[in-house]
Amino acid sequence: MLYWSTFPSVLVDDFKVFTLAVLDCPYPPALSRITGLERASVATVLLWFKRLRVFATWLRHRPAPGVTDHDLDRYLDHVRAIQASTNTRRQLLNAVRAIWAYAPQLPPEHRMSVREPWQGRSPGELAEDIKTGRGNKTPRIEAATMTALLDWALRIVEDIGPDVRDAWREFRQLYPGTHLSHRRYDGLPQAERMKLFLQAAREEGRELPGDPERPGAIDFRYVACLIGLPALSGSLSGASRSLAEAAGLPVAEDFFIGRITGRIDGRPWRERPLTVSELPALVLVVTAACFVTVSYLSGMRQ
């Protein structure tokens, strides 16, 4: 049942003529190529009736015989403002296109004055272009840009990522005192821990952690965490600090951690180990590279 009372009375005759043509005539070529069917089904007629009610309501002050390309562009803007799914917007536009497609079966006074709605752009394309905040409407990234981005994302994940991961894991174990190297200090008083640490550092040629904001100064927070104490500025006693300062060991510019094993083009990707101060940023870089790689491989290429 078609309830014509829901249409503007001034336009009822126009839409009745169109509906009669749809019921009596086969699909016009412009539609049969898309549907592969000979004529519109009853379900299609009902759907067009519902969708054209929106068009008729908007069109009440613009009689159908006078509909121009400019009018259709304005109606497209109207559809863009409707909070609806992409499929509903596509149906709204497709119903209008059907009126144009059936023009040869309509009396001249009931036809639209357009060569082809929206310059031939399909309702599906127009519906996808509408930005309503639903779905991803971001322009597609160019292939050349995506190729370069993916190449470096993979380099970071495969060549740099393992070093960052291992350094971060080591730091997360040193900081709370759960690293395996702390076992040698179990049960020892602080001064004995410091002496044992300094002796091992001298034998292994290691530098003491330095403060990047005070060149040449020992960063005692990280010395503390290396001997199994909380990484706090007040963890070490004055006597322990004096032992470290009197040891004569070289002081690094920062607290270096981990090893560099990754290579790019046959060379280590950096000369010195990572520093604690740069670790958080590097972890974010590796995380972003993982996200880019997984997103690309899962088909999210926008």
Image (cartoon, grey):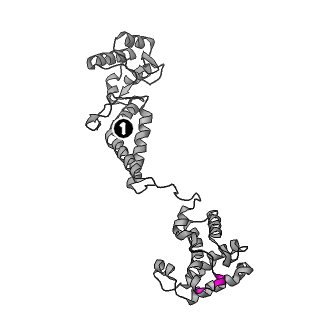
Q: Is residue 66 visible?
A: yes
Figure check: 97 above or below 204: below
Figure check: 117 above or below 189: below
Q: Position of residue 224 (x, y in %)?
A: 41, 21
- Residue shown at the point (71%, 73%) measured from the top left: 62
Q: Position of residue 1 (x, y in %)?
A: 64, 85
In terms of image quadrants, where is residue 97?
A: bottom right
Residue placed most toward the observer, 206 or 239: 206
Figure check: 104 above or below 255: below
In terms of image quadrants, where is residue 16?
A: bottom right
Tag 1: amino acid: Arg
Q: Position of residue 18 (x, y in %)?
A: 62, 84
- Residue shown at the point (47%, 83%) measured from the top left: 37
Figure check: 44 above or below 180: below
Magenta extent: 105-115
Left or right, 211 with reference to 43: left
Q: Which residue is mark 1?
A: 165
Would you say the magenta stretch is mainly helix, strand or loop?
Answer: loop
Q: In the current view of this chain or complex, which residue is farthest to the bottom? A: 24
